[in-house]
Image (cartoon, rainbow, N blue to C red):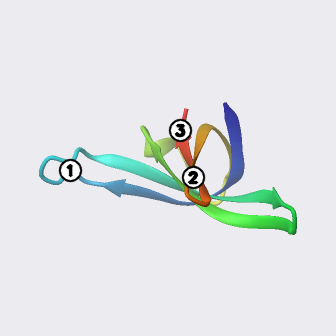
């Protein structure tokens, strides 16, 4: 398991639509070390409760990661 650290930039809620259930996402601005320096990336994570995240706050979220193509994707653990 990894810990994703960063600043909350947005909290999104999507209502139920047809067969899709309601779900929530948090957008976290995080920094990743690369060979050429730091890279800043906005990471979207699906979350169970949007009320525990405040825009502008610093967070640490346990995540898992997997590679697809040339990018790494994160999911809440």
- Which dot, 2 or 1, sits closer to the camera? 1
7 sits to left or right of 33 = left
Query: Closer to the N terminus: mark 2 or mark 1?
Result: 1
Q: Distance between the residues labelled 1 and 3?
A: 21 Å
Q: Where is residue 57 in the image (x, y as percent from the top left)?
A: 67, 54
Seen at 76% across and 66% down, the residue is 39
- Which dot, 1 or 3, sits closer to the camera? 3
Image quarter (top left, top right, bottom left or bottom right) of the C terminus:
top right
Residue that label 2 marks: 54
Q: What element carries label 3?
A: strand
50 sits to left or right of 58 = left
Discs 2, 1 touching: Cβ within 8 Å: no
Q: Is mark 1 on a helix, strand or loop?
A: loop
Q: Where is residue 4 in the image (x, y as percent from the top left)?
A: 68, 45
Residue 36 sits in quarter? bottom right
Discs 2, 3 touching: Cβ within 8 Å: no
Q: Residue furthest left?
A: 18
48 sits to left or right of 14 = right
Residue that label 3 marks: 76
Seen at 72% across and 47% down, the residue is 5
């Amino acid at each position: 398991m990894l810990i994703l650290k960063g600043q909350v930039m947005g909290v999104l809620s999507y209502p139920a639509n047809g067969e899709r259930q309601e779900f929530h996402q948090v957008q976290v601005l995080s920094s990743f070390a690369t060979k050429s320096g730091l890279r800043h990336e906005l990471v979207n994570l699906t979350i169970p409760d949007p009320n525990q995240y405040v825009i502008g706050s610093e967070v640490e979220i346990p995540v898992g990661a997997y590679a697809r193509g040339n990018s790494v994707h994160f999911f809440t653990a």
